[in-house]
Image (cartoon, grey):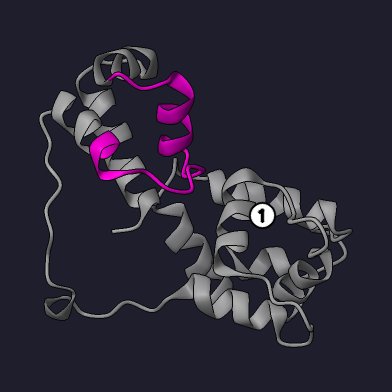
Amino acid sequence: MVIQELGRAIRNARNTRGLTQAQLAAAAGLSLNTINRLENGLFPDLGVKKAQAILEKLDMELTINSVELKAKKPDFVGMASTTAGVSFKKQLTPDELKHALLAGKVTPGKEAHFIVLLEEAPRSLLKGLVEQVGSWVKPGKVEKNLKKIAKQVGLSEETGAWHKKTA
């Protein structure tokens, strides 16, 4: 489980219980900012004690499953970051790509990487990337942020075919 999946599970459980982020934060002894960033997939790391405090207030628990039993899903984030950086000395890391897609902001100095990704990546890769990262947040957020990123790097829906790849 990645931190973004945990954030989505927490958001769903909180909403089901009718709690606000502020109420959950107070009950778990954490800041509102921590809960907000976690639910939006923007929290880089969360300690086990903090995770347990949140999950406890939502009547949830963290379980560990053997990875070997699951069918391995394609890592679209990894493939997309490799595709974006193939022509460059400095790579676009998977974490930089995830953060950009979740925040809607291009990683400084990596604008060209996003142009390559949007213009040259196969449709199946972009679609899988949007689905993978989109599964961690509210529906439509990643698509909206991808449009923001395209605009930031000078690509528009009218001048490029990138937007058809994610539909």
Find numbered disc 1 in the image and state the secondary structure of the residue it sits on.
Answer: helix
| In-front residue for pair 21/151 | 21
In the image, farthest residue toward the bottom: 87
68 over 53 or under it: above or below: below
Identity of the residue drawn at 21% across and 25% down: 16
Position of residue 122 measured from the top left corner of the image (x, y, whole percent) = 62, 82
Give the quadrant of residue 131.
bottom left
Mark 1 belongs to which amino acid? Leu
Whether 41 is among the magenta residues is: yes
In the drawing, does residue 136 fall left or right of residue 67? right
Whether 39 is among the magenta residues is: yes
Identity of the residue drawn at 30% across and 46% down: 6
Magenta-highlighted residues: 29-51
In the drawing, does residue 45 fall left or right of residue 122? left
Position of residue 54 measured from the top left corner of the image (x, y, whole percent) = 24, 30
Position of residue 136 measured from the top left corner of the image (x, y, whole percent) = 40, 50
- What residue does disc 1 label? 146
In the drawing, does residue 121 fall left or right of residue 137? right
112 over 22 or under it: above or below: below
Q: Is residue 51 visible?
A: yes
| In-front residue for pair 109/49 | 49
Identity of the residue drawn at 48% across and 34% down: 37
In the drawing, does residue 53 fall left or right of residue 152? left
**Which image quarter holds the N terminus?**
bottom left
